[in-house]
Amino acid sequence: MNNSLYSPAAMPSDFVIALARDVRLLILDVDGVLTTGYLDYDAQGERVKSFFVQDGLGIQLLRQMGIPIAIISGRDSKVTAARAKDLKIDFLMQGAQDKGAALKQLMIDAQVSPQQCAYMGDDVIDLPILRAVGFATSVPNGHVLAQRAAHWISTSGGGAGAVRELAELILFAQNKLNSAYAAYLYDEQRPNMDIM
C-alpha cells in the first residue's frame, strides 16, 4: 500500500483500514457533518448553511475513483439540494426522519450490502445507520452516542474537514489515494475540476 500522500494526525488501526477497504458507497449526514451544525437564518427566515470546500474536493476525488456518494438527511433543505447538485451527489434523500428505512431503500437503489457502506453521522438520529453499516464514522463534535457507535472518529470537526479526512482514509485503504491526487501533482495530467 503506497502511503506517500497519506499523513493523518494519527494512523488508523489495521482494523479500520480493513473496513475502509470494503467501502463501495459513502453515505453522509449533512448538519454536523458536511456543516458545523449551526443553522443561521437570513432576514427572510431562510436557513443558511456553510459547506467546507476541502470536503467538496474529497467527495469529488472519491467519485472520480469510482466510489459513489449518498446523502441521507433528516432535514429537507433547498441549500442541501443545491450543494448536492453542485457536487453531483449520486443519491440524495432528504426529510428522512427514519434513517434506518432510508438506508434500506438506498442500498436497494445503489445495489450494495451494508458491509459495503460507510456512513458519517453526528447524532442519535444517525444511530440506525451507524449500527447497520460496515464502516461507521463520526466527528469529534458529535454526540457521545454517535461516537460510541463509530469504528472511527475524524480529528477535524463537522463542516471543517471531517469528510475530507474520511475520503482520504477510504482512498488510502483502497490504494487509490496517489491516483486520485496524480492530476494535481504531475504536469502530464490535468485535474478534472468539477465544482467543489
Image (spheres, rainbow, N blue to C red):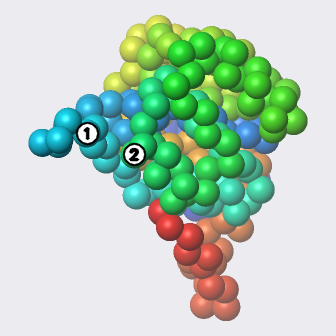
Q: Is residue 191 above or below residue 16?
A: below
Residue type, label 1: Glu
Mark nearest the camera among 2 and 1 is 1
At x 60% / y 90%, what residue is drawn? 187
Rendered location of residue 93, percent (x, y): 61, 33
Instruction: Give the SS element for disc 2.
Output: helix
Which residue type carries mark 2?
Val
- Which residue is pictured at 50% across the width and 67% down the height? 195
Q: Is residue 27 visible?
A: yes
Would you place residue 152 above or below residue 155 in this image?
above
Q: Is residue 22 above or below residue 145?
A: below
Q: Nearer the viewer, residue 67 or 21?
A: 67
Name the side, left or right, on which 112 lies relative to 134.
right
Q: Is residue 195 above or below residue 153?
A: below
Q: Relative to residue 159, is residue 119 drawn left or right?
A: right
Snapshot quadrant of residue 136: top right
Disc number placed over residue 79 in the picture, else none = 2
Q: Is residue 10 left or right of residue 109?
A: left
- Label 2 vs label 1: CA separation? 10 Å
Residue that badge 1 annotates: 46
Image-based side of 179 in relation to 58, left or right: right
Find residue 167 and report its horizontal and vertical position in percent: 59, 48
The reply to whether residue 168 is in sight is no
